[in-house]
Image (cartoon, rainbow, N blue to C red):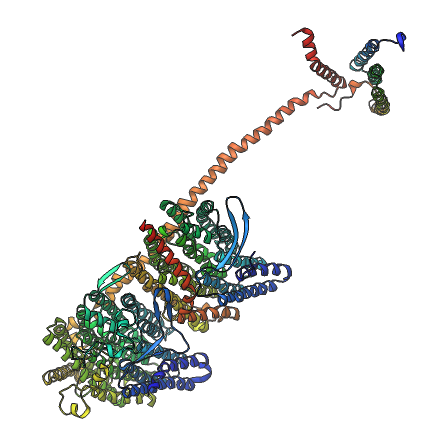
Amino acid sequence: MEDISLVTVVLMLPLAGLVLMMLFSRTEQAYKWAALVTSLVTFGASLLLVRNFDTSAAGLQMVHRVDWITADSFTIRYYVGVDGISLWLVLLTTFIMPLAILASFNPIKDRVRLYYIFMLLMEWAMLGVFVAQDLFLFYIFWEVTLVPMYFLIGIWGAEERIYAAIKFFLYTMAGSLLMLLAILWLGNEAGTFSVPDILAKLESGELAFSTATGRWLFLAFAIAFAIKVPMWPLHSWLPDAHVQAPTAGSVILAGVLLKMGTYGFVRFNLPLFPEASKTFAPYMAVLAVIGIIYGAWVSYGQKDVKKLVAYSSISHLGFVMLGIFALNPAGIQGGILQMVNHGISTGGLFLLVGVLYERRHTKLMSAFGGIWRAMPLYSGIALVIVLSSMGLPGLNGFVGEFTILLGSAGSSVLSWWFTFFGAIGIILAAIYLLYMFNTVFMGALDKEENKHLPDLNWQELWSLVPILVMVFVIGLQAGYFFEYMDGSVKELVDYVNGYVLSAAGH
Amino acid sequence: MGSSEVAVELYVLLSAVLFIMGAMGVVLRRNAILVFMSVELMLNAANLALAAFARQWASGSGHLVVFFVMTVAAAEVAVGLALIVTIFRTKKSIDIDTVHMFKG
Amino acid sequence: MDNFFDLVPLVVMIPLVGLLINLFAGRQLGERGVSIVAVGASGMSFVIAVLLWIAQVNTGYEAAVIDMPILSDWIVIPSANVTIPWAFRVDTLSVTMMLVVTGVGTLIHIYAVGYMHGDERFPRFFVYMNLFLVFMLILVTGNNFLMMFVGWEGVGLCSYLLIGFWFDKPGGVGWKNSDAARKALIVNRVGDFGLVLGVLITFWTFGTLDYYREGEAPIAHHAATDAEAPLFAPTLPGEEETHAVSGPLGVFNQAELWLEEGGHQVNFGMVSLSFETTLTVITLLFLLGVTGKSAQIPLFVWLPDAMAGPTPVSALIHAATMVTAGVYMMVRANVFYHAAEFSSFVVAVIGATTALVAGFIAVGQWDIKRVLAYSTVSQLGFMVAAVGVGAYAAAMFHLVTHACFKALLFLASGSVIHGMEHGHHHVSHGHSGHHDDDFDPQDMRFMGGLKERMPVTYWTYLFGTLALAGIIPFAGFWSKDEILLDSLKTGVDKGLLSGYVGFVLLVVAAAFTAFYMWRQVSLVFLGKPRHAAAAHAEESSRLMTWPLIVLAVLSLLIGFINVPSGFPILGWLLGEHQFTSFLEHSVTYAHAGTFSFLLATFAVLLALGAIYLARSVYSDRVLATLREDPLAINPRTQRAFALSSAKLYWDEFYFKYLIYPYRNAAYWLAEQLDWRFWHDYVHERLLRDPFNAATRALSGRVDKQVIDHSFDGLGHATRRIASRLRRIQTGYVHIYTMSVLFGALLVMILILLPLIRDWLGL
């Protein structure tokens, strides 16, 4: 029996907070603050993860491993830990949650207690997805995230919330079922569901499956993850979910939930099925590039600002996928950093949209114009976040996109035109984001109802300021963030490429 | 004991005769009191057979059952007569064919 | 003196601090405080740039690489061998740019204090201006392509913010300004797309983006005539063998090394190209970036619209500094362009064509700033063409002189606009009935005769005009002459087509320059006022005229820093091609211009001829009754003038064939393909509805009818049977007793059955 690791502490803090909150909070006010404090404490604990992280090691750290269900033919474990791939995503989750909770203080007036219960449940499940190292445990967390999000959209959403919630649930569920089959198959063959154990068995030759099997399994996982990302053309649930979800729901959805898909590719698809990864890399990259251009193009055609931001996610996550399937260190590290960047920038954009929606109860861009004059502080912050999403050098978005393109240009599995078309996404991003910024913030303040909009209140301000800080920190000092992921990614890339080489050598 | 003893077959024969008489009474008579008495007759026929066999096999259990039957019969008389009196009060008759409220 | 180099981060930091102060405390500081902070920051940067220049001279033009304090390296990915630091480079090229940016920048800051007086967003304006300085200085001082790209996009952002500075003007003007701002940034992004791809290829080719590593000096070709001299050995620390492999060298020296060796193959990803081809690709991609930032064909369309910004912005960003970033970048990468002959040809053709086309369009404009905008495009064409013909020093020289006289012209035009607005204000106050809505303070048709009303502005404007037209001894003469001569020499001496093409186009462009400038001077200052506003215009404040005077003096004198060799007297007096010698320490392929008396005479006569022509077309008699341009009335020039006025329908072409199709396609994708087809039709008609139909079938037919009915039937059957059975419950006691009796009999028979069977012997 090992000691309880810090990872377990971070994972269980939201749950502990949830229990305490339900036991001792009496008023709605108390619920709000209890949720905020819990999420802040969790964030603080996750900072300790960074402090204790050994950047020179490649493998899992702060592992906590307990047998959970043991049977004759297999073992299911509570097996958690972090490595360079998951560390920043854990941090992203704990970073976004307090902001989402703070941003909910004013807008959520209905069934307040239930709302914060779901928020903390959500945090717990998302953290679980990022730290679980056992396929079975991972699957449970993966599915648990659906439940709070389903209710967040379905209860506190906009007009068509029920439709959106059901679509979200069904879409992701459909993909997950294929993954469940693949997980069961793998666990049954390997006699364990723990990924490190499976990898060890694969490496030692104790477990082997044919090329065709590997590819089928890859696809089963890939469809589940691709729906979550979402990759073109499986994106149809996203605009509905985003547009109907409450602000904090959109922030979590874009900020963290979508990353579960891209993370899944890096964590499971690449190491478990290296041959298939390499075979399918160009096809995945084609979808990624189509996503980049399609998402950006469709964004430009939107009239609803929230929908515009929703489609921009498809474009941005296309970049992430392109980086991952470049299958080299620069691409994958860029991809991981871009996951974080997208969480911060797009999370910020949704917060910004929420601010407008609170005041005007419309998200149509044509209802605004000249907001900069009415709300200078808000608009200044919006400018920075829009620029970060646009990939202005010196801000976070650029570092990710540039590193991804660097990876795809130097990739030995992708030809040059992936980079070419990917880079076109940079132009298109400027087109739709500036279109949005111009129509909403610039121009004459000519609509009477916009003339006396109040500027940010303290909750809104403080939910945006941390985002601003991170936009600059990552943008100026990306090296610090790469340092933590370098070891793990290097090992992963070496393993994937090494496997293919040895397979070719036979 | 010796030869002065009556053979058990005779007791059983008497018992059977008594039982058949009782059964006939129950089936054929309309008067509730007479039906009732016929039931008593059947019970005592059974008692006779039990006592006879008990004697033949020198076992106390037969007697035991006889006492039980007698007790039950006494109880039955008590309840049954009470019922008959009540029926007579309401129907002014003790003809059992006038009492068919339990028709399905 | 060495530690002067360590000051270079301050060049960037001081405007940064200035902008932060004004950003957070601008409201409290008031106009005066804001101006002091902003101008002070800009001025201190200039002082540091001067110190760096002195340090350069004193250290024998030694280059230095200085790491950014506070921040550590920017992008480091050990496993991918990526290291992109925050590092500054001090060499003669970057110092030249720093001096131009901070020097002209400071003057324009001072001018802007007067120009922006009373604007409600006064502090914000100076925040943007200082932010621009920060990015522009990062652009010119960065030691790698990516840092340059930070500045490159950053100045684009400032340009966006400043063009759209008056985004909320009423009457549709605000929207127009905002659109102009957006246009600028998006067009620049198209260029940046090329630049990013170029940078990516550069990285995979060289394994680094650093221009030169620390302690590494550019290979000096002008001095190394000795063929046996080792190429770069003296300047490198450590052993030679370790540097023979790629990696430790900066891109430029590595490129020279590989070119020297020959036959180097570039392999990365799935690409395999010869090194020469790679350089061609890189330089062409860079050129796309240049056409965006430096407003060349085909991406020059944003610059004329950018005049929507306040005039100091036009002067600083859209004339003197930002737009020259492309030229700076190509000069910085002169090693690449020198080696890539095809790219150089393309550069020369694009530059020269732009110079001519923009010069032609400038003739047909009425807006005072628009004329100058096209003139800027045209002059940038000169610089780009100079790079194309290999005259890197001439390009930089023209960049410097142009920064002075074009900033002067813009500021003077701002002064004119200010004066006109003042006059208009005066007039509409005096006679409240006399109020014309179509008055435009920038339209030259309303001006005329401002010479008397605004003498300082007139004289400084004249200096700028003469410098731009290339009249000896003004600054423009020296730099333009050097470009013309260099292109001709490239044609004649090296036999390159680009030289001839460049020369012919540029000479015609130079004639156009003199013509449209004199047209402008005539329309604005000469003749009699054609509008009451012009008649009541007033000279601008001292704060605005002083920078004009300083710039006018510079426009006259700055050309003397690079007197061509062989020029009589002056060359002996001031030293020959001082500026080129200065640059040679950092620009490998800089070469000094010689002087050709014949060409200089020809160029000056051409310019004077064009001025004479302009004056005769726009004579006082014509100006007095001006309604239409005389060229538009004259049947021989009518068509050409219309074409020029319409800007060759360039914008219309883009709108029709690029912008509208893209936008309509976006609507179609968003509404039809993605929403109606994919979201609604496929998901709802093809997935949801059949599913619902199947559900209905199951619940209606199968469940309700088949399954429900079968269970209902069971119930009914039970009831039917029960109702039959109840009949045997008669209620008659004797029937019950009979049945008991028969039942008992039956049981007895059943029990006795075996006995009976035995008895019967069955």
Percent x, y of residue A461: 49, 70
- For the question of whether residue A369 can be seen, the reply is no
Given residues A4 and C331, the one toward you in this image is A4
Residue C45, compared with residue B38, is above or below; it is below
On the picture, is C114 further left or further right than C443?
A: right
Percent x, y of residue A404: 35, 62
- Quarter of the image that includes the N terminus of chain C: bottom left
Percent x, y of residue C517: 20, 81
On the picture, is C545 further left or further right than C628?
A: right
Given residues C711 and B100, the one toward you in this image is C711
Percent x, y of residue A478: 40, 69
Residue B97, compared with residue C71, is above or below; it is above
Given residues C309 and C472, the one toward you in this image is C472
- Quarter of the image that includes the C terminus of chain C: top right
Kindly identify the residue that appears in the image at 37 percent across and 82 percent down: C10
Residue C734, compared with residue A149, is above or below; it is above
Number of marks in the image? 0
- For the question of whether residue C743 can be seen, the reply is yes
User: Quadrant of residue C64 in the image?
Assistant: bottom left
Given residues A276 and C18, the one toward you in this image is A276
On the picture, is C620 further left or further right than C116?
A: left
Kindly identify the residue that appears in the image at 46 percent across and 81 percent down: C25
